[in-house]
Amino acid sequence: MTQNENHETHGDIKELMDAWHRQTEVVDRIRRAGGFKEMFAELDAETRAKMFANKDRRVGCIDEGCDECGIRVAGSGILFKPEDKARFIEILKKEGIKTVTYHDSCGAAGVASGSSDAETVLGAAKSFADEVAAGIGGEAVKLEHMSRPLDFHVASVVYYDGTGKFDPTAGAEFLAKGFVISRPLYPSAETAAAEARLSFDIAVGPHGYGKLVNEDHPFIIVVIGSPDDPEMSEEKLREEVALKFDGVSFARIESFTPPADEEEDVSQAA
Ligand SMILES: [Zn+2]
């Protein structure tokens, strides 16, 4: 794979480098604190609670530009195998989710459609969102705001969230820009871990930071354990995600578990 070739041809290399410098500044600050776990522990209780108070019940993409799309799986499920799609729709129904979002420049829809044409990719994203919406008796909505440039990805982190309530916009000033995987929504550990790996492949590929991700600045998989669901514990999620990164250079797993009492306070307030 020739990394960064798109940036050179599109002439947006300066914009990419600016994004990279902003991102490494945050990542280096977290590193100096000791890591994501230590950074999180240093935050005040109110900020920590807010970071796990996602009340947006829409389903959206793992894309780091889809800040305001609620609960997240790649392309709102577009990459799932047929049997997983059926199971996913059942999970959405059980969760009472009525809205499915889709967006421009969706990497998952690009993979699913096998196209790099923007209109074709958007069409694939919309048609899948319509299909899921029909399955749950809800509606498909296009996400109008993207918090990244449409031409490339600016994430060098994926949040592998076992709580399903993680809201990266709430602690944006402390967090590195990252993909979000809402683990409880996935039909299996295999599909969720595969999408964590996809996020890495995007970040180190021609639509991401490419070769800027290296030994000194690795891609970080931030596993967030659930404090009250043993199926989504920090340890279990670390193990399942590690299987997809076996032998991968320039990727590192970190993890933490938010305190249970803060989560309870949040759900009572909801
Ligand atoms: Zn997407």
Image (cartoon, grey):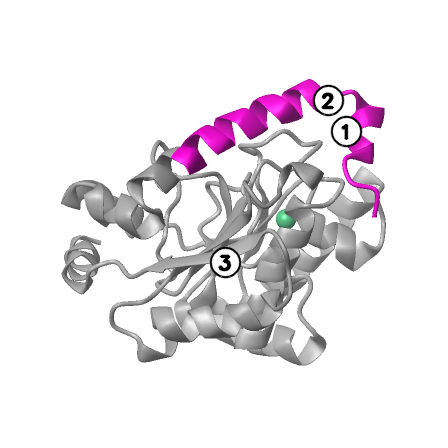
Circle 1 crowding by C-alpha within 10 Å: few under 14, some 14–19, many from 20: many
Q: Which residue is mark 1?
A: 7
Viewer-nearest residue: 52 or 123 = 52
What's the residue type where badge 2 is placed? Answer: Asp
The quadrant in which residue 247 appears is bottom right
Q: Is residue 179 left or right of residue 125?
A: left
Q: Which of pointers 1 and 3 indicates the residue nearer the eye?
A: 1
Instruction: Give yes or no for residue 5 being in the magenta stretch.
Output: yes
Residue 234, percent from left and from top: 35, 68
Q: Which residue is mark 2?
A: 12
SS class, disc 1: helix
Q: Please name the residue shown 67% across and 32% down the image.
A: 150
Circle 2 crowding by C-alpha within 10 Å: few under 14, some 14–19, many from 20: some
Q: Is residue 188 left or right of residue 85?
A: left
Q: Which residue is mark 3?
A: 181
SS class, disc 2: loop
SS class, disc 3: strand
Q: Please name the residue shown 73% across and 45% down the image.
A: 205
Question: Is the C-beta separation of discs 2 and 1 under 8 Å?
Answer: yes
Q: Please name the residue shown 62% across and 43% down the image.
A: 214
Instruction: Give yes or no for residue 177 being in the magenta stretch.
Output: no
Q: Earlier in the sequence, mark 2 or mark 1?
A: 1
Q: Earlier in the sequence, mark 3 or mark 2?
A: 2
- Report if the beta carbon of the residue with label 3 is closer than 8 angstroms to ligand 1: no
What stretch of residues is rendered in magenta?
Answer: 1-28
Q: Which of pointers 3 and 2 indicates the residue nearer the eye?
A: 2
Q: CA distance from mark 3 to mark 2?
A: 28 Å
What's the residue type where badge 3 is placed? Answer: Ile
Q: Is residue 170 left or right of residue 154?
A: left
- Report if the beta carbon of the residue with label 1 is closer than 8 angstroms to ligand 1: no
Residue 50, percent from left and from top: 25, 45
